[in-house]
Image (cartoon, coloured by chain):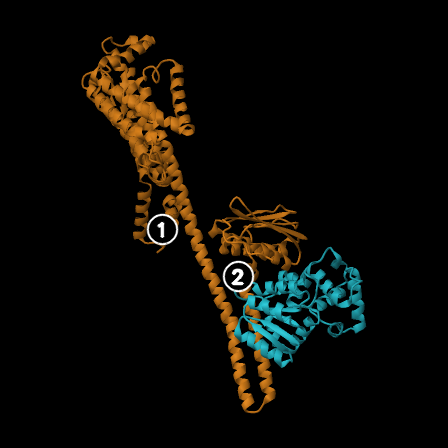
Chain colours: A cyan, B orange
């Protein structure tokens, strides 16, 4: 699986390269600035791009912008955004194109390297992985109107875990229920959000997006 | 020894006894009395005045009244000191009138200022020598009264102090013609007609006198500029008149003749020789030729000099007041800036302290722990205890995770990343997303405000949102951010309980302090039952280029 890494701090870039190589990823390119990253992402079309939000030249959200621009150029290009902080605003922007294949994680999640590697694979496969911190802040919101207000507390729990990128099996293990029960909850969520037609992966993305926009 | 406060000076009766005499030695008591005397010495003028007033009644009244006044002065020195200047003014004015009365109709001898004065045979200046003393004394009494009112801090003397400040151009007052001078000028003019105004035997002339004074006071209060013009014109004319009258008595006689034509009965009762001369008074001096010409001329010259000296000030009146107003505004601004600057400096230092403490107790300490754990793991590896080494490495990783979380929170509090990345509007939108209730943001800025102002407004909005979450029990919140007429405005409206009070609690006060260095203000409208509107306004230009949000 080919990966492009965009990270301006050498130590972190080097660490990411070693971590991913150790987990069997092939590093197509590892660059340190936004313009280089855009070239690498659109030119090499990797299986997944791992992008730091804050990068040169302006040291603001250059990485995030490159990620969005690259996905505009190569629709559905899987991107996992890493950052020292997570913001709901940025999560919304990343998911706005509804194409899936998006991850948004805090940098320190790489400490759990196995979980991180699996998140990279999920994103590459078109899944949506949001950092638990974003999700927990979503959970804190009071929803009084809109489709989400119709969800049962259990369904909201399932949706939150879905947003973190967990599979039905993982959700079932987490909530101590059977996978079948989780499927039932997921179906309920899709119905209530009016997402019954499309395929399962895309429905999961749309459900998470609806969650973010609530 | 207990320190003596200013307050003690004015309430000696109980405090001296309770605190001074019982708690302190004689030295402190005497120094207290000294301070008391120094602060309220005008009170001691009252007994003198009382003795003088009672002089007409003869012994033992002066002594008796003086003792009574002394007791009053000692029991209530502050009140007596307040009363003294007014008593002096009144007594001085009384002397002035007394002298006129003697010159014009009073035949009985009078007692004033230790002087027995009578008209003598003819009511002229020469034949009534003591009248000069009465005049001098009355002028001195009035001058001392005005002087006491002008003392800094003397109650009731504000108008006098302002007039003096305007004469000198000090104390934030423009250097101009004090409108209050109209009163003495009117006094001098009325004196010219005293025969027909003050001492007429009908009541209407006195009514006219009172009316003229009332009109004068009204002008001073409501039309100060007109009053000032009258002061200068009146003084110049008086001065010119004085000079003319000193040279030609005929002028003065005109006034007398004018009075004569009024058919005043007193006029007929007096000797034909003295009548015209004795009726017109000028600055307390009868215009009767002879030695008084000298006085009249001198006074005229002085008055003319004063009038001419004041004339140019009329021309610069408007500019002077504008300058004084500007100076006052500047002084206020400097005061405000001095205060907010020290507040801002204090806040900055407190903020640095907080960051230092957070780093010291948090991330720094954790990194030390990480280092220690790794070192211990090293040793376990050497001594071939891989299980223990693994546990230590896991511990180190967890400690570094916690350090990262703490650093992240710290950074968010210093300068929020979204604010740095995207600017104020997007940062406020992100705040809204992080709030547990529905927040509707309508914000539009053509460009970014300066960074310090953006940060201040951001933290202000964050603090207000926190307040709403904690106290308002609101369902929806609306935030509006606009830049109109050079002012950055943020309105936060919630549909909660209302009754928010910026005076209570530290949240809103903190917001105010944060905004103050930028001349920003915070206004709260929060009737019980809601809605609550908190408005923030900071004057600023949107300078930097807007950071695009695409």
- In the displayed structure, does residue B247 sit left or right of residue B348? left
Q: How far apart, in angstroms, are the residues tagged by discs 2 and 1?
A: 51 Å
Q: Nearer the viewer, residue A126 or B464?
A: A126
Q: Which residue is mark 1?
A: B4
Q: Which residue is mark 2?
A: B415
Q: Quadrant of the C terminus of chain B?
A: bottom right
Mark 1 falls within which chain? B
- Give above or below for A58 relative to B484: below
- In the displayed structure, does residue A187 sit left or right of residue B144? right
Give residue B173's mark. Answer: none
Asked where in the image residue B177 lies, by quadrant, the reply is: top left
Element under disc 2: loop
Q: Which of the two discs, 2 and 1, labels the residue nearer the N terminus?
A: 1
Count of labels shown? 2
Judged by depth in the image, the label closer to the viewer, 2 or 1, is 2
- Please provide percent x and percent y for residue B119: 24, 17
- Check chain identity for marks 2 and 1: say if they share one: yes
Mark 2 residue crowding within 10 angstroms, few (<14) / some (14–19) / many (20+)? some
- Please provide percent x and percent y for residue A1: 66, 76
Mark 1 residue crowding within 10 angstroms, few (<14) / some (14–19) / many (20+)? some
Q: Residue at x 52, y 81 (%)?
A: B372
Element under disc 1: loop
Residue found farthest to the left:
B291
Mark 2 falls within which chain? B
Asked where in the image residue B271 lies, by quadrant, the reply is: top left
């Amino acid at each position: 699986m080919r990966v492009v890494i965009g990270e301006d701090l050498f130590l972190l870039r080097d660490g990411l390269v070693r971590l991913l190589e150790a987990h069997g990823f092939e590093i197509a390119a590892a660059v340190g600035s936004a313009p280089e990253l855009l070239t690498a992402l659109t030119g090499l079309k990797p299986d997944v791009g791992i992008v730091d939000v804050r990068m040169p030249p302006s040291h603001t959200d250059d990485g995030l912008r490159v990620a969005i621009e690259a996905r505009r150029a190569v629709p559905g290009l899987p991107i996992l955004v890493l950052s020292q902080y997570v913001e709901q605003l940025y999560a919304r922007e990343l998911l706005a194109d509804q194409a899936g294949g998006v991850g948004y994680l805090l940098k320190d999640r790489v400490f759990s390297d196995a979980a991180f590697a699996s998140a990279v694979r999920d994103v590459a496969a078109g899944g949506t992985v949001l950092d638990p911190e974003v999700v927990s802040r979503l959970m804190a919101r009071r929803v009084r109107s809109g489709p989400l207000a119709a969800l049962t507390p259990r369904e909201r729990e399932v949706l939150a875990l879905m947003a973190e990128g967990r599979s039905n099996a993982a959700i079932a293990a987490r909530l101590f229920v059977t996978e079948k029960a989780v499927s039932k909850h997921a179906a309920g969520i899709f119905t209530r959000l009016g997402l019954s037609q499309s395929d399962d992966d895309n429905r999961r993305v749309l459900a998470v997006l609806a969650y973010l926009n609530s | 020894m207990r320190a003596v406060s200013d307050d003690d000076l004015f309430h000696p009766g109980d405090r001296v006894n309770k605190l001074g005499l019982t708690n302190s030695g004689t030295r402190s008591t005497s120094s207290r009395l000294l301070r008391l005397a120094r602060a309220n010495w005008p009170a001691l003028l009252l007994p003198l005045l009382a003795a003088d007033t009672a002089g007409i009644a003869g012994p033992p009244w002066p002594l008796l009244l003086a003792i009574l006044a002394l007791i009053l002065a000692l029991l209530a020195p502050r009140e007596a000191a307040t009363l003294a200047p007014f008593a002096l003014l009144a007594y001085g004015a009384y002397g002035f009138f007394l002298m006129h009365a003697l010159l014009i109709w009073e035949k009985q001898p009078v007692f004033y200022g230790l002087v027995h004065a009578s008209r003598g045979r003819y009511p002229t200046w020469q034949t009534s020598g003591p009248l000069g003393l009465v005049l001098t004394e009355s002028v001195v009494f009035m001058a001392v009264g005005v002087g006491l009112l002008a003392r800094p801090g003397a109650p009731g003397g504000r108008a006098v102090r302002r007039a003096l400040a305007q004469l000198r151009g000090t104390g934030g007052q423009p250097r101009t013609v004090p409108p209050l001078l109209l009163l003495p000028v009117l006094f001098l003019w009325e004196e010219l007609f005293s025969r027909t105004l003050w001492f007429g035997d009908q009541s209407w002339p006195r009514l006219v006198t009172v009316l003229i004074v009332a009109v004068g006071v009204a002008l001073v209060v409501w039309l100060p500029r007109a009053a000032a013009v009258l002061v200068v014109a009146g003084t110049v004319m008086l001065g010119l008149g004085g000079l003319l009258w000193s040279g030609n008595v005929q002028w003065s006689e005109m006034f007398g003749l004018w009075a004569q034509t009024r058919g005043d009965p007193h006029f007929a009762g007096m000797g034909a020789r003295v009548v015209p001369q004795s009726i017109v008074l000028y600055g307390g001096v009868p215009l009767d030729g002879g030695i008084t010409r000298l006085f009249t001329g001198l006074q005229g010259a002085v008055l003319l000099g004063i009038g001419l000296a004041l004339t140019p000030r009329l021309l610069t009146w408007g500019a002077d007041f504008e300058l004084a107003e500007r100076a006052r505004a500047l002084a206020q601004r400097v005061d405000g800036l001095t205060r907010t600057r020290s507040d801002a400096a204090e806040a900055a230092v407190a903020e640095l302290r907080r960051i230092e403490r957070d780093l010291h107790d948090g991330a720094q300490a954790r990194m030390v722990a990480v280092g220690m754990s790794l070192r211990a793991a090293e040793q376990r590896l050497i001594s071939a205890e891989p299980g223990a080494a693994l546990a230590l490495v896991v511990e180190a990783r967890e400690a570094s995770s916690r350090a990262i979380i703490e650093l992240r929170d710290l950074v968010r509090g210093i300068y929020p990343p979204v604010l740095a990345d995207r600017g104020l509007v997007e940062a406020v939108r992100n705040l809204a997303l992080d709030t547990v209730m529905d927040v509707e943001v309508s914000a539009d800025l053509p460009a970014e405000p300066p960074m310090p102002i953006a940060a201040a407004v951001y933290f202000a909005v964050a603090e207000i949102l926190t307040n709403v979450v904690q106290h308002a029990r609101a369902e929806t919140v609306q935030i509006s951010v606009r830049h109109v007429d050079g002012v950055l405005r943020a309105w936060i409206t919630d549909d909660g309980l209302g009754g928010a009070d910026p005076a209570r609690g530290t949240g809103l006060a903190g917001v105010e302090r944060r905004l103050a260095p930028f001349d920003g203000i915070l206004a709260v409208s929060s009737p019980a039952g809601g809605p609550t509107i908190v408005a923030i306004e900071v004057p600023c230009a949107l300078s930097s280029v807007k950071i695009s949000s695409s």
